[in-house]
Amino acid sequence: MNSIPQIIFFKQAASQGRSEAARILVKEGGADADLVSPASGVTPLYLAVQFGHLNVTKVLVEEGGAEVDKENTDRGNTALQRASQVWDSTKSKCLYKKLKKDFLQMTYR
C-alpha cells in the first residue's frame, strides 16, 4: 500500500476514533504510524490526540511505534505538546510513558 491511501485511512481512523482500523493498518498493512499528511502536515497520532481518541492514540504509540515527539510540518507542534494542551493529565500519561521509555532507551545504550 503506498503512502497516499495510508494517509487517507489513517486520517479517518484517527479523527473518528477507529482503533481497530488503526490496528489493522499498522499490524496487518505494515503502514508507517509516523506518516505526515502532505495536505495538512500532521501525523495520525496528532489527529487522534486532537480529537480526543485515547484508544487510537494507544494503538499508534504502543503497537505502531509512533513517535510522540515527532514535529508536524505545518507548525512544528508535536502530539505530546497537543496532548498537554487539550487532555487532562490522566489521558496524557500514555504519551508521557512512551516518551520516557524512549528517552531511557536512548540514554542507556
Image (cartoon, rainbow, N blue to C red):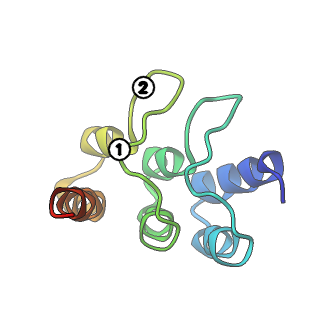
Label whose residue precedes the other's in the sequence (2 or 1): 1
Q: How many residues crowd around disc 1 within 10 Å: few (fewer than 14), some, or many (20 or more)?
A: some
Q: Does 32 sit left or right of 68 as displayed?
A: right
Q: Which mark is residue 12?
A: none
Please tell me which residue lies in front, 7 or 34: 34
Q: Which mark is residue 76?
A: 2
Q: How far is disc 2 from disc 1 in space, using C-alphas?
A: 10 Å
Vertical comparison of 83 with 53: above or below: above
Q: Position of residue 57 (x, y in %)?
A: 45, 61
Which label belongs to residue 69?
1
Point 68% across, 75% down: residue = 24
Q: Amino acid at mark 2?
A: Gly
In the shown orientation, is residue 95 left or right of residue 23? left
Relative depth, front residue between 100 and 96:
100
- Considering the numbered disc 1 on the image, is that residue within a helix, a strand or a loop? loop
Q: Residue at x 63, y 57 (%)?
A: 32
- The residue at 77%/48% (across/down) is 3
Q: Is residue 43 above or below residue 90?
A: above
As rendered, which of 34 and 44 lies closer to the eye? 34
Relative to residue 36, is residue 51 depicted above or below?
A: below
With 89 as the anchor, is 63 left or right in this view?
A: right
Q: Amino acid at mark 1?
A: Asp
